[in-house]
Image (cartoon, helix red, strand yellow):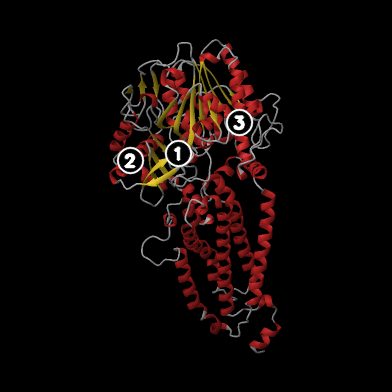
Amino acid sequence: MSYNDYLAITPDRMKRYSLKSDLMFMVCSFLSLMALSSLARLLLFYWNSELATHAPGSEIAMGFWVGLRFDLIICSATILPMAFGLLFPRGLSARSFWVAWLMILSGIMILVALVEPVFYDEFHTRLNSIAVQYLNEDPATVISMIINGTPFFTLLIVWAVCLAVMFTVYTWLDKCFREPEYASGVKAWWPRVPAFIVVMFLLAVGFRGGTIRSGAPLRWGDAVHSQSPFANHLALNGVYTFIKAIERLGDKKDSNTVWLTAMENQAALDITRQMILQPEDKLLDPRSLALYRETTPKERLLPDNVTNVVYILMESFSSRFIGAEGDTNNITPYFDALTEEGLLFTRAFSNGTHTHQGMFATFACFPNTPGNEYLMQSEEGHTHFSGYPAVMSDLGYESNAYVYNGAFNWDNQLGFFGNQGITHFVGRDEMKNPKFIDPTWGVSDEDMFNRALEELDALNNKGKPFFAMLQSLSNHMPYAVPEQLEIEPVTSMGSRNERMTAMRYSDWALGEFFKDAKQKPWYNNTLFVLVGDHGFSVNDMVTPVDLLRHHVPVLMIAPGLREAVGATNNKVMSQLDVVPTATSLFGKPFAQHCWGRNILALPENDPGFAIVKPSGNDPLVAFIKGDKVLVKQPELNPELFRYQLGPQPSAQELNEPSVLADMYEQLSAFLQTAMRSLNNKSVGDKPGLEDL
């Protein structure tokens, strides 16, 4: 029987297609994947198009062009198995298998394409470790948040439709390229070897982002082509950034060693101490502990009857939408009224962009450092810090409470703060007859504050000074609030109406708490410290670190405070400065290992500083000092900007090499010393594993 006769009677599933057919099927599949990647980028652009208004059209177009290079990497990786398939005895003739392979990878790409626009709108970053961290924390809660806070079922239908379209494309390509192989044996196989070599060379170029230059292949920093962060982010590929984030999760220590070796350890320590220590400070163990010190305030700034301290950590309370800081949308009328009774810090910044970081920065007084963004869940987080609970304990306080809408197992709050000295926790499961229960998180802010009043009454009844921590939650996706609201829903802010309504409701609940608290016997004996845990993404991305996501209010209220220190303070500060500043108001010596300062004791020529790092394991950090901010993006040289906050925020890049060098040295020293101290378990009042 001749070979042609064999082909005539052989079923299609047993035939071998020609090299030309295999190559055409592979090339067209590759082009389909590239088109899919470009459509994903177009969807990201469309969903977040308001951000594009701050960038020239040419820079947005360049984002699409540069993005093709990142798409090459992912699409080349997808096609790689097919290249090896060329050498199989039947080549790529097992088309059902290859169509299935392409469908699996396309399904992942489509899923990322549909998820990323929502993710970017929330975090202003391409898909990264935040997604992994959320799912790892509590999948049930995260799934509930997604279902209740996003157009989940619509996206699911769109995903299924897109998969059907891609299946149609791949099966059509299969049918178009089925020319049989008329040769057999070695004669049919040997031409595939040089074809394989050529294809592998082209894929290698694709893996490098389309470049054959010597040195490193395409990297994250190559996406930066513009002064617009959105245009730069547009150039990236979501699958690429997600894979890189997972890689960094696996070797977080290795990926951040650059900060641990920036300079000699002693030099870093000396610079850090110069940055933090004030004349009122005296180091208690300079050989073993970087900043553990006794602070002796110069004077008491509060009346003698003020002995209690209550911190309120406000969920997603962004300064961008606070009337007292320039907003005109009437989102926070109750907070605005409270600013007339206390001291408002107008240039305060959160150390991270996640509640987790806001908690440990504010209450543990430790910075958010690269590789340690989820400190409370890590081995390093088991250490005893010398933060708010430890400081109050050192001052003789015993009675305390931590009241929160949700469950304390989230972010390991119970384990972490229990280890820091908090003894009484009241969370979702302890709430009595709540008026409203969020299907995802817990009770409403109204319920939390009502229970907080009861707990503060109970603490006061013990007859001793007390301290407490209250934490709100309603202003968090899915922004579930009671149906019957005492406030008008926000209807004028488009896609942000739901979030702004939740923020307005949270503000109302805060106002009701203070209205009731003022009737309590303990109110005039209490210092209240209100802190935003972080901001959220808005249309103005000020600098690559997105400063408005970090700009939060800090408000301190107590009898006589406003008269003693004024109504506002415009120094730059971070959450690390809150405890040293608030505790110093009492005028008593106290021991602390806080990585911040007493802002009220800064000399006139010290503008204050803040070191911030967004959530996720992307090694992006910034150093804010006065009206300047230094931004260090991964794989890029540091950049220096002059920024402006308020209703019309902006940033202008500066060419001041000496200032940039000084600020980068301080940033590097601070991070190096903090990370070494954390690794050495020397962040509290006890020596660590070794001397500094």
Q: Which sits earlier in the primary sequence, circle 1 or circle 2?
A: 1
User: Mark 2 is on which residue type?
Assistant: Met
According to the image, label 2 marks what residue? Answer: 663
User: Mark 3 is on which residue type?
Assistant: Ser
Q: Crowding at label 3, few (<14), some or many (≥20) Cα neighbours within 10 Å? A: many
Q: Position of residue 15 (x, y in %)?
A: 65, 78
Q: Position of residue 73 (x, y in %)?
A: 49, 62
Q: Nearer the viewer, residue 622 or 257?
A: 622
User: How far apart are the two marked residues, 2 and 3, measured between alpha carbons?
Assistant: 37 Å
Query: With 334 as the anchor, is 65 left or right in this view?
Result: left
Q: Circles 3 and 1: CB distance less than 8 Å?
A: no
Under tag 2, what secondary structure? helix
Circle on res. 256: none
Q: Circles 2 and 3: CB distance less than 8 Å?
A: no
- Quadrant of the drawing holding the C terminus: top left
Q: Crowding at label 2, few (<14), some or many (≥20) Cα neighbours within 10 Å? A: many
Q: Residue at x 44, y 56 (%)?
A: 223
Q: Which residue is drawn at 45% across and 18% down?
A: 561
Q: Crowding at label 1, few (<14), some or many (≥20) Cα neighbours within 10 Å? A: some
Q: Position of residue 168 (x, y in %)?
A: 67, 68
Q: Which residue lies furthest to the front in this view?
A: 328
According to the image, label 3 marks what residue? Answer: 506
